[in-house]
Image (spheres, coloured by chain):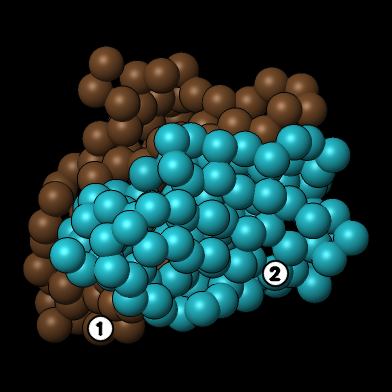
Chain colours: A cyan, B brown
Amino acid sequence: QQPVQSPQAVILREGEDAVINCSSSKALYSVHWYRQKHGEAPVFLMILLKGGEQKGHDKISASFNEKKQQSSLYLTASQLSYSGTYFCGTEMSNAGNMLTFGGGTRLMVKP
Amino acid sequence: NAGVTQTPKFRVLKTGQSMTLLCAQDMNHEYMYWYRQDPGMGLRLIHYSVGEGTTAKGEVPDGYNVSRLKKQNFLLGLESAAPSQTSVYFCASRYTSGKVSYEQYFGPGTRLTVT
């Protein structure tokens, strides 16, 4: 079942913060986050594993709440380069067979 | 390393025509995937493979067939194209090892239009 992302779209000014959420109705083993710029392929950001720690990469970090089956992506002090569509992909088990992607969150950072 | 490559990059088909999309990866990954992405939408899994000679259906397999004769290649076929198959097609590959989850590497995409 497809995870639900919120919000669907967000507009920020440079330097502002944003949070993107990804929720599942089923128990998850892992949550992946990818960013896709217009006309390009999705690019990997990070993976959150069940029982794992919060991850971070530069000013982008993420957490995984196992009780709620929800992951959140935190973008701090946003830069113009953060613009794009963010997708979460969820995995139900460690069989590693397939990810189910959410509908995406469009992020636009303005000067 | 070229990573994941896709051929062709663009294609226009008439309804009823057939074609094959080729995906190649040079990372020795076991797992490979075909997704389609419609405008403003997320990625939907068409078919996937967990190793040479194996294939499995994803979320939207109807109208497509796949083959994985060699570990590095994953082919997606459209036997009789329909306008509803107009989309951008992405191939991805993934390393796998025990209980750890690894990222997927995506190819650049193939933009297919069916008229």
Q: Residues within 10 Å of mark 2 (few under 14, many from 20)?
A: many
User: Residue B8 placed where, x, y %?
Assistant: 15, 48
Residue at the (21%, 62%) spot, across then down: A38
User: Horizontal placement of A84 versus A2: left or right?
Assistant: left
User: Residue B57 placed where, x, y %?
Assistant: 60, 57
Q: Quadrant of residue B38?
A: bottom left
Q: CA distance from mark 1 to mark 2?
A: 32 Å
Residue at the (73%, 51%) spot, across then down: A64
User: Horizontal placement of B39 versus B111: left or right?
Assistant: right
**Three-letter amino acid code of the residue under disc 2:** Ser
**Residue to which mark 1 is pinned:** B83
Residue A55 visible in the picture = yes
Q: Which mark is residue B45?
A: none
Question: Which sits in the foreground, B64 or A28?
Answer: A28
Question: Which sits in the foreground, B89 or A73?
Answer: A73
Q: Residues within 10 Å of mark 1 (few under 14, many from 20)?
A: some
The C terminus of chain A: image quadrant: bottom left
Residue at the (32%, 83%) spot, across then down: B84
CB atoms of marks 1 and 2 within 8 Å: no
Residue at the far right in the pictured view: A67
User: Residue B18 placed where, x, y %?
Assistant: 24, 64
Q: Is residue A13 above or below residue B96?
A: below
Kindly identify which chain the residue marked by label 1 belongs to. Answer: B
The nearer-to-camera label among 1 and 2 is 2
Question: Which sits in the foreground, B36 or A32?
Answer: A32
Q: Which mark is residue A23?
A: 2
User: Horizontal placement of A30 versus B38: left or right?
Assistant: right
Residue at the (72%, 46%) spot, across then down: A30
**Three-letter amino acid code of the residue under disc 1:** Pro
